[in-house]
Image (tube, rainbow, N blue to C red):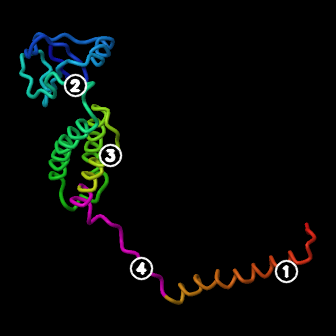
Amino acid sequence: MVLLKLKGRGLLCTSEDKAECVPLAEETKAVLKKDSYFVTAELINPVNDSGEKGQPYVSAYQATSLLNRTKEDIENWYSSQVVNCWNGFSQLMNHIASRDLCNWEMISRPYSIFQQCLEELADEEGYYYPNKYAEIYIKMGHKTYFSNCTSQYLIDPPDDILLPIIFAPICIIPFLVTLVVWKSKNGKPQI
């Protein structure tokens, strides 16, 4: 039995042949998720939804016991899969002109797709998000594509403006301390 995911729909198949698949009810999906031994396969490119016979491209897990998967196994799987998200993001970003790399309207879609890919991978395996692997690739994306997107460099104001701004609070503080001490000397509360 092979469990195929096509565009978010679960299909139960008795063989690798897509023609022998039937849609799963939500209750069946829940039962299969509880079953510790089942094979899942996912189509890499599930664009052909016309009912023609197709071939499953890769098998994600071959009879892997879900109950025996350790945190390290999930972490290793996730760390190997985030590369696919990065490659897709890089491919999308390579189609954007260098002058538009700092324009949020141009980069928001590839960036959102990248983030969604990282989140869905983590969610698929029950791995937490954000995590260190996602953070590494997000930082790499910022260094690779957005390192020159800083705003204008700020400069200090001229000294004739800066000095009064600094010294005004410094001069007011001793005056306020003296006022508080003077008012609290007689010990009687004044309203």
Residue at disc 2, secondary structure = loop
Q: CA distance from mark 2 to mark 1?
A: 76 Å
Q: CA distance from mark 1 to mark 4?
A: 42 Å
- The residue where tag 4 is placed is 155
User: Is residue 10 or residue 45 the one in the foreground?
Assistant: 10
State the image coordinates of residue 189 (x, y, percent, origin top left).
91, 68
As for residue 15 lying within the magenta part, the answer is no
Residue range in magenta is: 141-158
- The residue where tag 2 is placed is 7
Q: Residues within 10 Å of mark 4 (few under 14, many from 20)?
A: few
Residue pictured at 18% horizontal, 24% vertical: 64
Relative to residue 17, is residue 96 drawn left or right? Answer: right
Amino acid tagged 2: Lys
Q: Residues within 10 Å of mark 3 (few under 14, many from 20)?
A: few
Tell me if label 3 and label 2 are in contact, CB under 8 Å.
no
- The residue where tag 1 is placed is 182
Relative to residue 10, is residue 167 drawn left or right? Answer: right
- Would you identify the image quadrant in which residue 76 lies? top left
Front: mark 3 or 4: 3
- The residue where tag 3 is placed is 131
Name which of mark 3 and mark 4 comes first in the sequence.
3
Give above or below for 82 relative to 138. Answer: above
Q: Residues within 10 Å of mark 2 (few under 14, many from 20)?
A: few
Name which of mark 2 and mark 1 comes first in the sequence.
2
